[in-house]
Image: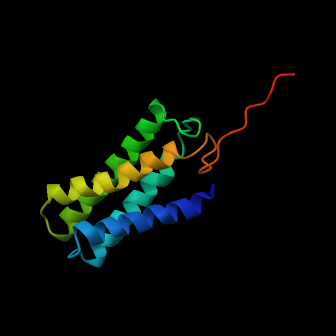
Amino acid sequence: MNNLILKGLLVAVFTAAGNLLFNNSAGPVYWVITIAGVVMTYFGQHLINSGSDFGTVNLLDFLKTALVAIGSGISVYVASIVTTGVIDWHILLKTVGTIAIPYLAKNLASDSNGTLFKKEVQPTAG
């Protein structure tokens, strides 16, 4: 699965699931802000190519994960301020973890081209 739009849609679904799980009283404005912020952050991190092989993560993978986590945290922060004027730090931290942990796991399960569950074949000398 190397389709950026499909992956972005999956990120939106995970964000919506996190909203349902951790803040089910949130209104539609909160949902739109958080999902839009997380998806934009996800697309933005693609400007960095980590190049790690399947089954490994490198420093750039951690940097990309941090960017996605911080971006999701900022979107939750903004959504909370806009909709209620109050920050619920527990919801913010849970949302950041809900995004960061699966994202890092996805990097671990991807090859250097971003293809999931595919080990790259090394060329043989000869």
Q: Is residue 123 left or right of residue 6?
A: right
Name the residue located 57 percent from the left edge and 46 percent from the top edge.
110
Q: Quadrant of residue 125?
A: top right
Front residue (pair 29, 7): 7
Name the residue located 64 percent from the left edge and 47 percent from the top edge.
118
Q: Is residue 8 left or right of residue 15?
A: right
Name the residue located 25 percent from the left edge and 77 percent from the top edge.
27
Instruction: Please tell me whether residue 18 is drawn above or below residue 119 in the rendered image.
Output: below
Extreme-right residue of the structure: 126
Q: Position of residue 94 (x, y in %)?
A: 24, 56
Question: Is the N terminus in the top left, top right, bottom left or bottom right quadrant?
Answer: bottom right
Q: Which colour assignment does the render follow?
A: rainbow
Front residue (pair 116, 15): 116
Q: Position of residue 52 (x, y in %)?
A: 56, 35
Question: Is the C terminus in the top left, top right, bottom left or bottom right quadrant?
Answer: top right
Quick check: can you spot residue 46? yes
